[in-house]
Amino acid sequence: MYAIKSYGAQSAEKPLGPLTIDRREPGATDVEIKILYCGVCHTDIHVARNEWGNTLYPVVPGHEIVGTVTRVGSGVTQYKVGDTVGVGCFVDSCGHCKNCLDHNEQYCENGNTMTYNAYEQDKKTITYGGYSSHIVVTEKFVLSVSDKLPLEKVAPLLCAGITTYSPLKHWNVKAGDKLAVLGLGGLGHIAVKLAVSMGAEVTVLSRSKSKEQDALALGAHHFELTNDKENMAKLANTFNYIIDTVSASHDYNEYLALLAIDGVMVLLGIPPTPSEVHAFQLIGGRRSLVGSLIGGIKETQEMLDYCAEHNITSDIELISIDRINEAYERTIAGDVHYRFVVDMASLDN
């Protein structure tokens, strides 16, 4: 073990601050990574403040990681010192259940190991995330990152990118499909870029007129206000797909009514309370209400390669680590376009 610098929370009530944590020395199949950039996901806030009731303190958040390989184990074959790599939302899984064998490690039947606030597969060692100088990850869960794109703008793809790419690919969104993105934030703005690149006719649904200009600048073809009842009635039976990125409580039925026959509404956001769904909104149009998490390692690599090919990155605001508490408050207030990313070099200042 060796000590490194990090930033984390000691309790739900205290702001994040400097911490010293231990990383394991790289084993035969491990890759040590010097972290260059780490995106700030809303999940980081939920966990740091114990809003989901499962935080293991002290906690070091961060699962949108881009960095440089600094050491590799003797058995590592895919990476070498100096390679640019990424780490996403999880760093291990059981490797032998059906889902793992099908490259769906995100749904590991025996419990995967999240990048932070989780236990390693030994079920006793706690993981610490990307608000730190280095991370050590088994080779299979390290991702290759192209140098074609600005690395600070790539970092959020490791969560926001794969969270939106996975359902678009799974439900085979294609040219000619009419797709709506509900909510224009960290997830929504990437969903717009990806869906447009796949040829879909994209509409942004929002309660805020002020987001129209941004939506169109991101490539959306249309913008529709959802707090206008006449406008919503006009949109009934319109969309093949709705990508719902909203984590605030909202009425699913209102949006299910906008789906055409056989339409699919995909839930990516996690509202704090359960929502009532009326059966008629589903059976009346043979509609589906589904959910999606992130993607497996194979699909995440596919997403990174796709984004490099199509020049897709996140719109970000780059900050130093000492501004992380400010960034949390601004994220909650929706005051970011559209993702904060921490320049981890600031950890040494």
Image (tube, rainbow, N blue to C red):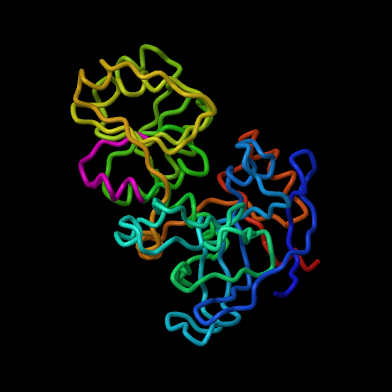
Q: Is residue 173 magenta?
A: yes
Quadrant where the N terminus is found in the figure: bottom right
Above or below residue 55? Residue 281 is above
Compared across the picture, whether 284 is left or right of 88 comes to left
Q: Residue at x 76, y 44 (%)?
A: 11
Work out whether residue 159 or residue 2 is closer to the camera in this orientation and state it: 2
The tally of labels here is 0
Compared across the picture, whether 60 is left or right of 281 comes to right
Q: Is residue 262 magenta?
A: no
Q: Residue at x 48, y 49 (%)?
A: 160
- Residue 158 in the image: state x and y as whole percent: 49, 57
In magenta, the rendered stretch is 166-181
- Residue 25 in the image: state x and y as whole percent: 64, 78
- Residue 152 in the image: state x and y as whole percent: 57, 61
Q: Residue at x 38, y 42 (%)?
A: 292
Residue sticking out furthest to the bottom: 74
Q: Is residue 248 visible?
A: yes
Instruction: Give residue 48's quadrant in the image.
Output: top right
Instruction: Give residue 167's quadrant in the image.
Output: top left
Compared across the picture, whether 204 is left or right of 37 comes to left
Q: Is residue 129 visible?
A: no
Work out whether residue 232 or residue 243 is closer to the camera in this orientation and state it: 243
Above or below residue 199? Residue 234 is above
- Residue 38 in the image: state x and y as whole percent: 61, 59
Residue sticking out furthest to the top: 230
Above or below residue 175? Residue 152 is below
Quadrant where the C terminus is found in the figure: bottom right
Compared across the picture, whether 65 is left or right of 213 comes to right
Q: Residue at x 59, y 82 (%)?
A: 71
